[in-house]
Image (spheres, rainbow, N blue to C red):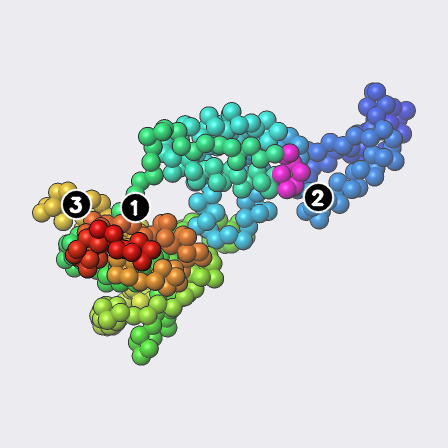
Amino acid sequence: MGKSLTGKELGQGISQRKDGRYQARFTNRFGKRQTIYGKTINEIRQKLRAEQYEDEKQINVITSDMTLDEWFEIWMETCKNNCCDTTRQTYRVAYNRIKASLGWRKLSGLNLIVMQQAINELKSDASRKDTKKLLVDMLNKAVDFDLLHKNVAKQINTVVSKDSKPEEPRVLTIEETDLFLEAASHYRYFNVFSLALETGMRIGEIIGLKWSDIDFMNRTIYVNRTLVYTKSDDKDSPNFGKWGFEFHEPKTDKGRRKIPMTLKAYQILKRQLLWKRGVEAKGYKAPEGYEDLVFTTTKNTPISPRDTTVVMKFITERIRKKRPDFEPVTPHTLRHTFATRCIERGMNPKTLQIILGHSTIQLTMNLYCHVTDDMLISEMSKFESGANENPEGVIPINGVKVV
């Protein structure tokens, strides 16, 4: 119990300073010792009740001396609590890049100079771009909660060198695709890679397929989920901090989609069905909850996305024995390759957007459609054939033929 200067009991946590002002202290839900000041005993009691009420109802968000580290944890808990574990881990990876240089600073002490210096120390423009996006989101929320007057992270420059250009995503040419498939046929997960090239599905979506998603009669694949191998970030879960497989819902409504089977896709899935029956015939029992998976390991367990990346490295090494200039391939290369083949063959971009599960057509065209040498030759052939239709070199202008 605190006391006044005359020795009168004032109540729990309330005391009177030597200058006559009153103060009250309590520990808020963030574990921070919070101090409130007032000129009179009635004023300090009202302020204390108001602060404790906000703390109890979780209306309060932050104190004025909160550091960026502390705000990140609150932002994750308050603003990103509904995100899946993999997304939350992505946020932590991006934040850890600047944690040492900025995490100890108070929010009120952040300015463009110190933030730009921290960003400049990162290794690539891609990591700078991702980290800036995180900081902008974090500080936007701080502005919304009246913790900052301005989000200076928006002015951060992520391109350090004028010569720095974003790396063009890897796309296989038709010849390289044939080389890849021939080499991949000697390794496990050949069916996984083949289906990726035939549908444009993400690897996580393919290894998350269930037989209930496959409609052989109507030649349709239904994409309803992604399988991930992740470390649980849910503090309320008994598996908190442990690694394991999880099914995740698509991030957007467009992600849940149906893809018509090509003949090759149909053959791949039929081949996989026979292979899966062979695994089950050997007595390998699938883990609970994963009994209906289309693609599994040879022991009928879920496939880790990391394993597909490792196998692709082996495939690349095999190809390089004959083609030393063959560049590395990742699972996402197959998705880029599928999209580029679709554009090369004249598919409507809006249709491609639906097949890939993108929320906007701009995302489809900007990220997944690349001009290959094959496409350049083909398009120039169209130009040339059009010129040959006018062999006399006559150019019509406003209805008048001009030589």
Decide which of 208, 112 is in the foreground and name it: 112
What distance separates the C-alpha of mark 1 from that of mark 2?
Answer: 48 Å
| Element under disc 1 | loop
Q: Amino acid at mark 1?
A: Pro
Q: Earlier in the sequence, mark 1 or mark 2?
A: 2
Q: Residue at x 31, y 74 (%)?
A: 219
Q: Is residue 357 above or below residue 124?
A: below
Of the numbered discs in the image, which one, if any, rests on residue 28? none
Residue under numbered circle 3: 326
Residue topped by disc 2: 55
- In this rendering, the count of numbered labels is 3
* Location of mark 1 (residue): 169
Give residue 315's position: percent from left, percent from top: 18, 51
Lateral position of residue 320 relative to residue 386, left or right: left
Nearer to me, 70 or 268: 268
One can see residue 370 in this view: yes
- Type of amino acid at the residue the image marks with label 3: Phe
Spatial separation of the CA atoms under disc 3 and disc 1: 15 Å
Magenta segment: 143-149
Would you call the spot at circle 1 few (<14 residues within 10 Å), some (14-19), or many (20 or more)? some
Give the percent coordinates (x, y) of residue 191: 23, 63
Q: Quadrant of residue 124?
A: top left
Q: In terms of secondary structure, what is the magenta stretch mainly?
A: loop
Tell me which corner region of the image, top left, top right, bottom left or bottom right, holds residue 379: bottom left
